[in-house]
């Protein structure tokens, strides 16, 4: 099982010619999952649109119980024009007693990742995972235990911010340079996931709208 890159090794997508305007990726607040496809690995994470009383808008709820499936969207983004990935999430619990550096612990209450497709040269596919870590400190990075093509990076950690919406803005091109050593001008797909298949645990996480911006 290769959850780290969602088996996106041979995707062919039409380019999106980005300008200075934000590029919407996940417009959950409009009640839409347009453009997203589900990829099932082991069992299934339930993804449904629900209303969030705090935000006063529709968000995506991910509920995983001993399973793993993710939502991904194939879309080519020009990182020269819109390098910033913006997203938010909220989760109710972190996992206890797991080792995320091992295959048996490769589960996350929340993750969002960008994929640079290697096409036929699948070994050149790159996945950068931003995760809510249960065992690493915020700011840690490590190789995914299933594949060296995927880099894990903890933007959140532990219990401190549970049950509270957390908002993020990351410069994807700079992060790819710093964390993977690759200077990429484009990414080819976005994926989100809450997964519990390796640990046999459960998790519930909410995702807000996702978009790319120039600043």
Image: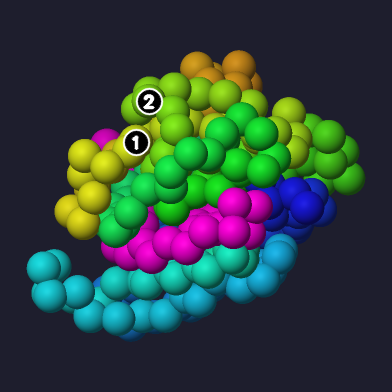
On the image, the x and y values in percent for residue 101 come to 61, 30
Is 193 situated left or right of 52 in this image? right
Label annotation for residue 117: none
Position above or below: 111 against 176 = below
Q: Residue at x 13, y 67 (%)?
A: 55
On the image, the x and y values in percent for residue 212 come to 37, 49
**Would you call the spot at circle 2 few (<14 residues within 10 Å), some (14-19), or many (20 or more)?**
some
The answer to whether residue 74 of the structure is visible from this angle is no
Asked whether 129 or 183 is in front, the reply is: 129
Is disc 2 placed on a helix, strand or loop?
Answer: loop
Q: Residue at x 75, y 35 (%)?
A: 147
Q: Earlier in the sequence, mark 2 or mark 1?
A: 2
The answer to whether residue 12 of the structure is visible from this angle is yes
On the image, the x and y values in percent for residue 70 come to 58, 63
Is disc 1 placed on a helix, strand or loop?
Answer: strand
Is 167 situated left or right of 42 in this image? left
Question: Where is residue 89, by image quadrant?
Answer: bottom left
On the image, the x and y values in percent for residue 149 come to 72, 32
Q: Is residue 196 magenta?
A: yes
Stretch in magenta: 187-215
What distance separates the C-alpha of mark 2 from that of mark 1? Answer: 6 Å
Position above or below: 89 against 178 = below
Asked whether 153 or 162 is in front, the reply is: 162
Asked whether 126 or 198 is in front, the reply is: 198
**Would you call the spot at circle 1 few (<14 residues within 10 Å), some (14-19), or many (20 or more)?**
some
For disc 2, the marked residue is 137
Q: Residue at x 50, y 17 (%)?
A: 178
For disc 1, the marked residue is 157
Q: Residue at x 67, y 71 (%)?
A: 43
Q: Quadrant of the C terminus?
A: top left
């Amino acid at each position: 099982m290769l959850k780290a890159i969602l088996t996106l090794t041979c995707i062919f997508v039409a380019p999106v010619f980005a300008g200075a305007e934000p590029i919407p990726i996940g417009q959950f607040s409009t009640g839409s999952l347009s453009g997203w496809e589900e990829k099932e690995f082991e069992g299934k994470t339930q993804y449904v649109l629900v209303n969030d009383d705090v935000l006063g808008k529709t968000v995506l709820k991910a509920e995983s119980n001993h399973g793993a499936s993710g939502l991904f969207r194939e879309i080519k983004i020009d990182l020269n024009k819109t390098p910033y990935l913006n997203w938010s999430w909220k989760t109710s619990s972190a996992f206890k007693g797991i080792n995320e550096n091992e295959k048996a612990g490769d589960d996350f209450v929340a993750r969002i990742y960008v994929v640079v497709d290697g096409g036929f040269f699948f070994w050149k596919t790159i996945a950068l995972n931003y995760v809510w870590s249960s065992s690493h400190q915020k700011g840690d990075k490590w190789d995914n235990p299933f594949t060296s093509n995927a880099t894990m990076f903890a933007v959140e950690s532990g219990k401190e911010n549970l049950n509270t919406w957390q908002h993020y803005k990351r410069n994807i091109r700079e992060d790819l340079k710093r964390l993977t050593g690759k200077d990429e001008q484009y990414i080819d797909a976005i994926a989100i996931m809450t997964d519990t298949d390796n640990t046999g645990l459960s998790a519930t996480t909410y995702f807000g709208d996702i978009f790319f911006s120039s600043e």
